[in-house]
Amino acid sequence: MAAYVTTDSVTSFFGLLTGVSPAKYASDFDVIRLTRQGLPKKVLTSLAHKISLTFQELAGIMHISERTLQRYEDDAIVKTEYAEKAIELARLYTRGQEVFGSMDKFKQWMKMPAHVFKGETPVSLLDTSIGFDMVLRELGRIEHGIFA
């Protein structure tokens, strides 16, 4: 699989992670450290709002019950696997914004059923790593004018 990224791909997605300083995370190893430390629930909530996901959609993508996610205090650090999914989401949506030229256009595309995804919406595929890969590959095709 080829991932098409910009030269600032390591830190460009931090704009979606409110409260996380991009200056502290300049390399992939810094992002790994951030992932291992976990993220506060309020960062996940803010991310969901910015990318127009419901709490239920976010919980499904993260493989956590909506109720369990709601029980976390805003400043509580959520587990590593949830932080990793949040970072993947931020990176994907940042990439989509680059390809579509606007976050609003990308968010619309994410919620529209697509033939290439057998009639499913791209956002519905994000509960698996294969789904993330499929959406990223399709973004690469769109960027290069290769439509399915």
Image (cartoon, grey):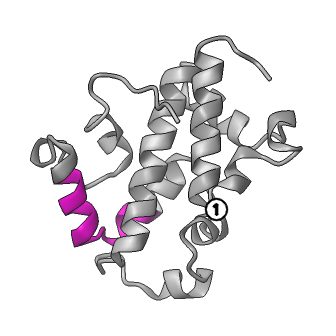
Task: Find residue 67 and report its image quarter.
Answer: bottom right
Residue lying at 53% horizontally and 36% vertically, measured from the top left: 1
Percent of width and height locating residue 113: 84, 41
Q: Residues within 10 Å of mark 1 (few under 14, many from 20)?
A: few
Task: Find residue 14 and report its image quarter.
Answer: top left
The answer to whether residue 19 shows anywhere in this view is yes
Which range is magenta?
30-44
**Quadrant location of the C terminus in the rendered image:** top right
Residue lying at 67% horizontally and 11% vertically, measured from the top left: 145
Percent of width and height locating residue 6: 35, 23
User: Which residue is situated farthest in the front direction here?
Assistant: 1
Q: In this view, does 70 lie to the left or right of 28?
A: right
Residue lying at 66% horizontally and 70% vertically, measured from the top left: 56
3 w.r.t. 148: above or below: below
Instruction: Residue under label 1, please give it.
Output: 54
Number of on-image labels:
1
59 w.r.t. 21: above or below: below
Percent of width and height locating residue 72: 41, 84
Magenta: main secondary structure equals: helix
Q: Does the magenta stretch include residue 33?
A: yes
Residue lying at 50% horizontally and 81% vertically, measured from the top left: 69
103 w.r.t. 56: above or below: above
Secondary structure beneath label 1:
loop
Task: Find residue 46 and report its image quarter.
Answer: bottom left
Depth check: give the residue in front, 93 or 116: 116
Percent of width and height locating residue 146: 70, 15
